[in-house]
Each structure stands twice: as C-alpha cells, then as structure tokens.
Amino acid sequence: MKKLFLAIALLAAVSCSKEKTYIYDVKNVDVTQANGNKGTAKTTTEFISIAYSDLFGTTIANADLLDMFVTYSSFGDKKLVEDRIIRTLIDRPGVQIPTNQAMRNDIGLFVTNSYKKLFNRAPNAFENYFVTSKIQSDTAITPAMLYYSFMTSNEYRYY
C-alpha cells in the first residue's frame, strides 16, 4: 500500500509541473512584390486602350473600344473577359509582336523589351533567368504566347 501511495504521489508531482514557455526572436520581414509600387488598377477603358496600343502601336477606334467596354462590363468574371479580350487582340491581323526568329536570335533582348513594353519596368534577375530558360528549353513557345501570359497577369492590370 505504501508503494502504491508513493507511486501516486510521485506521478502527481511529475504531472503537475508547469509547462515551459519558449520565446523565439523572430524578426519582422517586409515582403514586397518585385513589380515595384504598382498600386493603382487600370480602369476598364485604360486596360482595353493600353492593351490595344501595346499590340498594335496605335490608339483603338472608339467603336472598337465601346464594343469591348460593353462586353467587359456585361461579364461577372472579369479575368475571363480580360483573357478573351487579349486573345482576340493577339489573333487579329496587324498585331505587332516580334517574330519567333527575332525572339530566338536574341532572347535576352526580347525578354527585356517585353517587360519594358508591357510592365513599364526591366525584369529582375530571377524573371530574366526564368523566362529566358523557358524560351531556350521549349521551342514551342512563341512570342504571342509570352505576350498573352504577360498581358493576362495581375501585374499588367496595374500601373
């Protein structure tokens, strides 16, 4: 009986110990996007007009702008309609996208010029490496595909 009482007392003493509290010194890290301080979204009219200008090097006709604006405004899913607008513009005749041969002749220049034209900034080292390596490793990638991916990105929607 003594042994049982001693075992219970020992177990109670061990189980009632206070839990240790650990404090870690974690430094705050300010995380920002590499796209600079783009915090202002383009209006619908600006988005359509700028996309047209980027692809054709001229301003959009009022009738075309109005048609696309009405289409854009009538959809609830804005990313879907942005996708369709960019696809439609890229597929039109007269679009001014570099040729596949021009892109492959100087991939670095193509990447830099594309970022400057579409994002109004130079690519950072990682972006330059990533896009360049993708183009080099996959011969099926075309300039139109890259323009499409850049123009449908979240960054393109902001200035």
Image: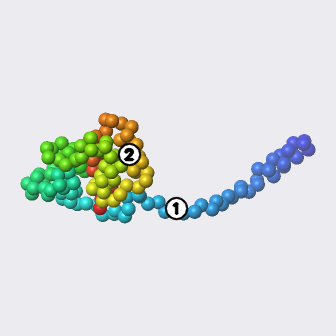
Residue 5 in the image, given as x and y percentages of width and height: 87, 46
> Where residue 21 sits: x, y (%)?
68, 58
Q: Residue at x 30, y 52 (%)?
A: 114
Coloration mode: rainbow
- From where the camera sits, is residue 73 visible? no
Q: How many other residues sit within 10 Å of disc 1, few (<14), some (14-19) or many (≥20)?
A: few
Query: Which quadrant would the N terminus be assigned to in this image?
Result: top right
Q: For the residues marked 2 and 1, what is the alpha-carbon distance in whole angstroms?
A: 30 Å
Residue 127 place in picture, x, y as percent: 40, 51
Which quadrant would residue 37 be assigned to in this image? bottom left
Give the residue at x 84% y 48%: 10
Question: Label 1, on which residue?
Answer: 29
Q: Nearer the viewer, residue 121 or 73?
A: 121
Residue type at tag 2: Thr
Q: Which residue is mark 2?
A: 132
Residue furthest out toward the front: 105
Is 2 situated above or below 69?
above
Amino acid at circle 1: Val
